[in-house]
């Protein structure tokens, strides 16, 4: 499959992306391929850490039950924990609301040499707040005294702010990937029912899940506009079919491998000339202890 076909463009409607692939890869084969690609990713992570010049930020968005948690666990399970930082952004705290909406994301960014994983991201500020504009009242924004003040110009401003935020990051050495796990409404129903039917999964269920599900069309519109307005050359969106979890995990891992592994500017550091010239001396010293 040509994975670049899943890279979002400004003129492509969300409904034109499939939520499930025609079976081009069996689940067993997908799991086997995932093992290979995540080993490659882990090897790249080691180079990234040693090179200490770039960071990688991987962002995941998707409706409830789209598989974000399990995908992150499976794709990055071979990583060295010292080189990966994961953040899950929930409802903003009182402290976070006292700053601009991007502040809590700035302070969670990966350091040089590390992978950062955002499970839900700065895009919540143009997704959840777009479906529930009343939440913006908690931000105490100048000129926004009621939801009637929130118009298309406001959202265009936020898209521009997010694009500028990501542009700054890429200019300073952060490599950005953004994945929308594209789940069908029917498959979400099946997964919610599974949470209800299996006692060990009950804890994952919330009555709020059903309330948000009733707003499905509004969320799809919010996702479509966000993706169309913020998929850029340096910070692209990929719309991943998410009805089949093993396939989705494989596709994400392969996209990462295809873009990161060829990077010739991320390599293990070389020894300085003086130290390199004394390697035999050091080996002999250790061998004759």
Image: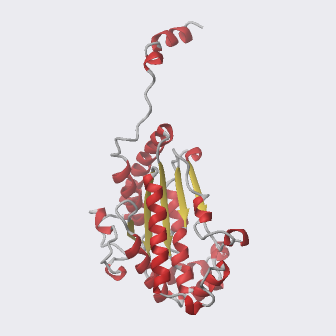
The answer to whether 58 is drawn above or below residue 272 in the figure is: below
Residue 94, image x, y percentages: 72, 72
Which residue is depicted at the point 31% across and 80% down? 16
Name, please, the residue furthest toward the top.
Answer: 288
Q: Quadrant of the N terminus?
A: bottom left
Residue 85, position as x, y percentages in the image: 58, 53
Residue 193: image x %, image y %?
A: 56, 82
Quarter of the image with the C terminus is: top right
On the rendered structure, is 201 left or right of 58? right
Query: In which image quadrant can residue 205 be found?
Result: bottom right
Task: Give left or right: position of 23 versus 44.
Answer: left
Task: Name the residue furthest front.
Answer: 143
Question: Furthest residue to the bottom?
Answer: 148
Q: How many marks?
A: 0
The relative height of residue 282 versus residue 104 in the rendered view (above or below) is above
Location of residue 117 with respect to 150 vertically, above or below: above
Q: Quadrant of residue 82?
A: top right
Seen as rendered, the residue at the extreme left is 2
Residue 172 x, y percent position in the rendering: 46, 51
Residue under the image location 37 percent in, 75 percent down: 228
Tell me, what colour scheme is on the image? secondary structure
Q: Residue at x 38, y 64 (%)?
A: 236
Q: Is residue 245 visible?
A: no
**Residue situated in front as seen by the camera: 201 or 58:** 58
Q: Mark yes or no: residue 268 visible.
A: yes
């Amino acid at each position: 499959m040509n994975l670049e076909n899943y890279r979002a463009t400004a003129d492509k409607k969300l409904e034109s992306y499939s939520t499930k692939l025609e079976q081009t890869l069996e689940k067993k084969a997908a799991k086997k391929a995932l093992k290979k690609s995540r080993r490659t990713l882990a090897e790249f992570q080691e180079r990234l850490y040693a090179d200490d010049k770039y960071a990688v930020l991987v962002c995941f968005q998707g409706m409830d039950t789209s598989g974000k948690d399990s995908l992150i666990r499976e794709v990055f399970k071979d990583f060295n924990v010292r080189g990966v930082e994961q953040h899950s952004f929930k409802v903003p705290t009182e402290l976070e609301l006292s700053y601009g909406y991007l502040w809590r994301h700035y302070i969670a960014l990966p350091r040089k040499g590390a992978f950062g994983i955002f499970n839900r991201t700065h895009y919540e500020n143009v997704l959840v707040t777009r479906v529930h504009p009343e939440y913006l009242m908690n931000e105490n924004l100048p000129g926004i005294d009621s939801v009637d003040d929130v118009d298309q110009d406001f959202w265009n401003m936020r898209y521009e702010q997010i694009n500028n935020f990501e542009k700054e990051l890429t200019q300073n050495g952060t490599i950005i990937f953004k994945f929308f796990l594209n789940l069908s409404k029917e498959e979400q129903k099946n997964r919610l029912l599974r949470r209800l039917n299996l006692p060990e999964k009950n804890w994952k269920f919330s009555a709020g899940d059903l309330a948000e599900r009733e707003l499905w069309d509004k969320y799809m519109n919010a996702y479509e506009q966000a993706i169309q307005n913020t998929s850029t050359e340096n910070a692209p969106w990929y719309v991943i079919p998410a009805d089949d979890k093993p396939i989705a995990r494989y596709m994400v891992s392969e996209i990462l491998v295809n873009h990161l592994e060829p990077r010739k500017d991320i390599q293990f550091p070389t020894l300085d000339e003086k130290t390199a010239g004394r390697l035999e001396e050091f080996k002999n010293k250790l061998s004759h202890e």
